[in-house]
Image (tube, helix red, strand yellow):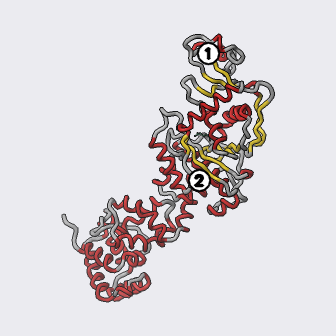
Amino acid sequence: MTVTVRFAPSPTGFLHIGGARTALFNWLYAKHHKGTFRLRIEDTDRARSTPEAMAAIVDGLKWLGLDWDSDIVYQSKNQARHAEVARQLLAQGHAYYCYCTPEELEQMRLKALKEGRSMRYDGTWRDRDPKTAPAGVKPVIRLRAEQDGDTVIDDLVQGQVTVSNQQLDDLIILRADGTPTYNFSVVVDDHDMAITHVIRGDDHLTNTFRQCQIYKALGWTVPRFAHVPLLHGPDGAKMSKRHGALGVQEYQKLGYLPAALRNYLLRLGWSHGDDEIISTAQAIEWFDLDAVGRAAARFDFAKLDNLNGHYIRATPDDELAALALPFVEEKAGRSLDAAARERLRQALPELKPRAKTLVELAERARFYVAQRPIALEPEAKKLLDGTARARLKDLHGALEQMVAGPQWNAPHLERFVKDYCGTANLKLGDLAQPLRAALTGSKASPGIFAVMAVLGRAESLGRLADAVVPPPG
Ligand code: GLU
């Protein structure tokens, strides 16, 4: 049997983080078992499904690197098939027409409310002759659900879960307007797509009991189920926006790397010993459902940040430069020319160890890629008084004359500037701070000689020359 799983989002909103984890678990399960991972968009709720949400789901999955096999299935396109199967059940006596009016159903609901139980359809039309149907009422089709015994799910995460069939009523499978209901569509599609394992959030457990009854009535093989506990915030409460219940694309905008988010989501509810950093290749090798925990996993931004920092450090510079570029350009407010890109690339060894996100990295990269004359922070401006400017002017001249291109590296520059200070009877501190202000526009930066090396000779000398000219006004 080839494992076939699916991710089946309803496109009524963005791909949220819980959905992304469900998709990841399905994807990993398929990869681990050399099976198939399908994407089915459950767009039967036409009023609430939007093209934007569909695009966000597809883009979110692509960004996360969760590629699916064969074409996307759009559930709404299968409605004729759903209706056909409903009629097949009708013909076999496993379903029946129900002519209850909305008023009658309301009465049933009120009665249940009074008796303090949840509403169950009372089976009015289960054994009634359709010939006695009232005129003008369009019927729905209901499943003739098993009434005796239990429905048992042997869940791959939750273990055995049982519900008495008396708790389940005859659910509607086809509405009066001929459209299928949610649970029914899911069963028909899962069967037609040959799904062997349904991995989804445990909020679907109650649906699963009903879906099992539909499978039984149709005589179809029931897939294996795995209901994964939902995500909670760090405080244990249900995930909300405050906790990070954002769309996947928000994480992209916040500067997380797909590999880091994959690793983080994997560890939310699944474990492999004490391993925290798990590459995708390892995850594929190790992932199985028996290591999915039963307790709700807690989402924690601090952990995600730490993992992201790790992945940033582990990304080769060329690749990281490409990933960071849009963030850097957004902060800079312009697209970078080749020279600025090169400075960004050269600055990465300095930037990488400190940044937890690409947004942070871009913030720190700002002064490297800035255009001349660079903006000076007030504190930096203050440092560049008349005395400092005169010193920098002199230093500029010395550097220009004595340090050629091939010598423009951090150790050489450090030696040169130190010697220069000795000759000029200055303390390094007298020069280093104005130098920093002139080159970075700020009072604080990484080591100034490393900065000079990254900026390169022409840019460093240019920035120094800019600072030497007294500011206007
Ligand atoms: N469409 C459902 C949802 O977005 C998922 C259904 C399923 O996985 O069976 O919650």
Quadrant in the picture for residue 329 = bottom left
Q: Where is 212 relative to 106, above or below?
A: below
Q: Give x and y (percent) for residue 53.
A: 48, 43
Assess disc 1: are there few (<14), some (14-19) or many (≥20) residues with their C-alpha within 10 Å of its C-alpha: some
Q: Give x and y (percent) for residue 244.
A: 53, 47
Q: Quadrant of the C terminus?
A: bottom left
Amino acid type at circle 1 is: Cys
Q: Which secondary structure, mark 1?
A: loop
- Residue at (71, 45) in percent of width and height: 294
Residue denoted by label 2: 69
Assess disc 2: are there few (<14), some (14-19) or many (≥20) residues with their C-alpha within 10 Å of its C-alpha: few
Amino acid type at circle 2 is: Asp
Residue 387 seen anywhere in this rendered image of the structure: no
Q: CB at mark 1 closer than 8 A to ligand 1?
A: no
Ligand 1 occupies quarter? top right
Q: Nearer the viewer, residue 286 or 123?
A: 123
Q: Where is 188 relative to 369, above or below?
A: above
The numbered disc on residue 446 is none
Q: Nearer the viewer, residue 111 or 424?
A: 111
Quadrant in the picture for residue 78 = top right
Q: Nearer the viewer, residue 174 or 271?
A: 174
Residue denoted by label 1: 100
- Residue at (55, 57) in percent of width and height: 65
Q: Give x and y (percent) for residue 457.
A: 34, 80
Classify residue 71 as left or right of residue 192: left
Q: Nearer the viewer, residue 24 or 68?
A: 68
Q: CA distance from mark 1 to mark 2?
A: 43 Å
Q: Give x and y (percent) for residue 67.
A: 56, 55
